[in-house]
Image: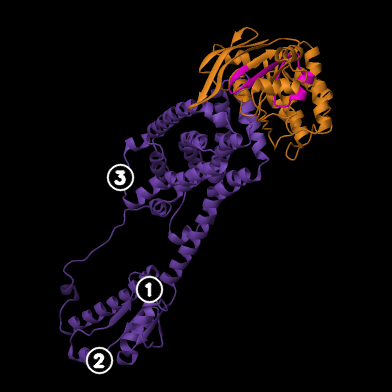
Chain colours: A orange, B purple
Amino acid sequence: MIEVQDLHKAFGAVKAVDGVTFTARDGEITGLLGPNGAGKTTTLRMLYTLMKPASGKVLVDGIDAAVDPIAVRRRLGVLPDARGLYKRLTARENIEYFARLHGIETQLMHRRREALVEALEMREILDRRTEGFSQGERVKTAIARALVHDPKNVILDEPTNGLDVMATRGLRTFMRNLKSEGRCVLFSSHIMQEVAMLCDRIVVIANGRVVADETPDALRAQTGEANLEDAFVKLIGSEEGLAA
Amino acid sequence: MSAMLTVWWKEIRENLRDKRTVFSALIYGPLFGPILFVVLMNTLVGQEMKKAEGPLKVPVIGAEYAPNLIDALKQQGLVPQPPIADPDEAVRNRDTDVVLRIPADYAKAWRDGEPAQVEVIYDASQRESGTPTSRLEGMLKRYSQQQGALRLLARGLSPGIASPVVVSKRDQSTPQSRAGMMLSILPYFFVFAVYIGGMYLAIDLTAGERERQSLEPLFANPVARWKILVGKLGAISAYSLASLVLTAVAFSIAGTFLPAEKLGMSFDLGPGFIGQAILLELPLIVVFAVLETLVAAFAKSYREAQTYLGLLMIIPILPSMLMSFMPVKPAHWMYAVPLLGQQIGISDLLRGIPVAYRDIGLALVCGFAFAALLGAITAVVYRSERLAISA
């Protein structure tokens, strides 16, 4: 479970995150929806302790990120905005590097890796160097690398960005599986259809603030719009930066 | 396996797959110095030898006015060349090193017992004219003294009367110390190998990782950043050390190709020298690894880091330059200054002067302390939020 309480973060005069509060529960997929530049990536970066919030609190499974950032990172599987694979290493070596950084012993590492390779259907690319990978192959490798320590909480920053239809469908199935395994899945997106289709709960962010935190059905009811797209536009106040 | 070792091993392995890093750390860095050195020394020494021992070919103007002088010079190894029209111009254009001109009134002055003048035309600003000119002067001086002595004897006087003071030169340099003078540039090559050996790795592991956006996922792992930094510094140091060891071995092999006997010099570049030189350089490996990482951490991109570190290459040259422009007497405290200590220590070792363990210890302690200080600063920079954010 990930709890976020009144996060603030500014870069100079720009208030990137200006009082964000929400909770992502176990066994649910929570979508962080907002136009480009709304503060989604900055919020997520504070969750996985890459950045320190100016004020506010982040709790992961009840652990305060400001108090014990390393314990928090141990409980998180993170696919950052920057995928950043090691091009001179194979997909397998990329995954095993992160497994070792988590201190996972060899036997267990092989089991977890095999499970992820099956689930993500990446057997063929496993022993190729990641240089020259397609966008989809890169995301698969980065996800396998992020989840090799079997984290209870999964944070995915725009996971379907740049993927083709087949890869996107595969990824959605994978995310539903994570949910059915009882994990807390939090992902960001600016694509409304995707969020509507996958999420149990939608947190809408605009200009660094949460403008809605509801189930898809409740969102429709709250805005009085039958169509989700219209509901979002009404919440955000403009159509800028959103994709259908 | 601990996180630091994991990072260390991954960086070593990944960068062994990078041609540029391997080339600069394991080929260019270690071999540049020794090869350049052997080629330079052999060319230089070869040239000097030819000039110092071979027949001395000098254009002579007015040889017909002094046949006896020319015969005497020929006996000393002079090979007179046909006269040239404009000796001043020829010397300035470096067509010839030196020209001998005998004026038309030479014979008359000689007969009258007056000092007979000859002209040696040369250009002192041309380095290669030095040896032939002094050889020619020596020949002329010898002939003059000989003839002077004969004239005194003919008048019933001892030739010694014209030499109230005789200078006898006693050179205190040993063969090793003469070699050391010529090898004064060598310590720089050691430092260069250390610097170049780690440079590309340092750029790649910080600026490069940020540019490729892999620093952010790396920092999402449950490992303290200073541990990641230590792992990376270890990998840089390992490449640097490999470069240094290869340099030392290459120099040791190169030493056998140096024209040592021709110069009456001897070099001791054996295992003892290698061992002590590497020991002295150890702190520099860490100092440079940290310094290069620190600079790379401030750079926004790989290229920027490359530019900064290229400029910083002046640092290892500084002590060598200082020492050659204003030679100072080595003192014990100098071993406490990183780079300077290495410079004078290796110079001494080359001259065959043993370096005291106390001095080596001082260099090690101070060098590592300096590296630790730089390391603490780098760790602070590594903790900054800015470092991880690539986009």
Q: Are marks 2 and 1 in contact (CB under 8 Å)?
A: no
Q: Secondary structure at mark 1?
A: helix
Q: Which residues are magenta?
A: A184-210
Secondary structure state at the residue bearing disc 2: helix
In the rendered structure, find residue B329 and report the number of the disc placed on it. 3
Q: Position of residue A189 (x, y in %)?
A: 70, 25
Residue annotated with mark 1: B132
User: Label 3: how many residues lie within 10 Å, few (<14), some (14-19) or many (20+)?
Assistant: few
Q: Residue at x 27, y 83 (%)?
A: B118
Quarter of the figure with residue A41:
top right
Q: Nearer the viewer, mark 3 or mark 2?
A: 3
Relative side of B316 to A77, left or right:
left
Residue on which the image places disc 2: B107
Point out the image quarter for the C terminus of chain A. Answer: top right
Tell which of B27 and B303 is nearer to you.
Answer: B303
Q: Check the residue under mark 2 and report the chain it is in.
A: B
* Mark 1 to mark 3 CA distance (whole Å): 33 Å
Give amino acid for label 3: Lys
Which quadrant would residue A236 be assigned to in this image? Answer: top right
Residue that sits furthest to the top in the current view = A62
Q: Is residue A10 left or right of residue B123?
A: right
Residue A132 in sight in this render: yes
The stretch drawn in magenta includes residue A152: no
Which of the marked residues, 3 or 2, is nearer the chain's N terminus? 2
Residue B59 circle label: none
Mark 3 chain: B
Q: State yes or no: residue A186 in magenta.
A: yes
Instruction: Classify mark 1: residues with Cα within 10 Å, few (<14), some (14-19) or many (20+).
Output: many
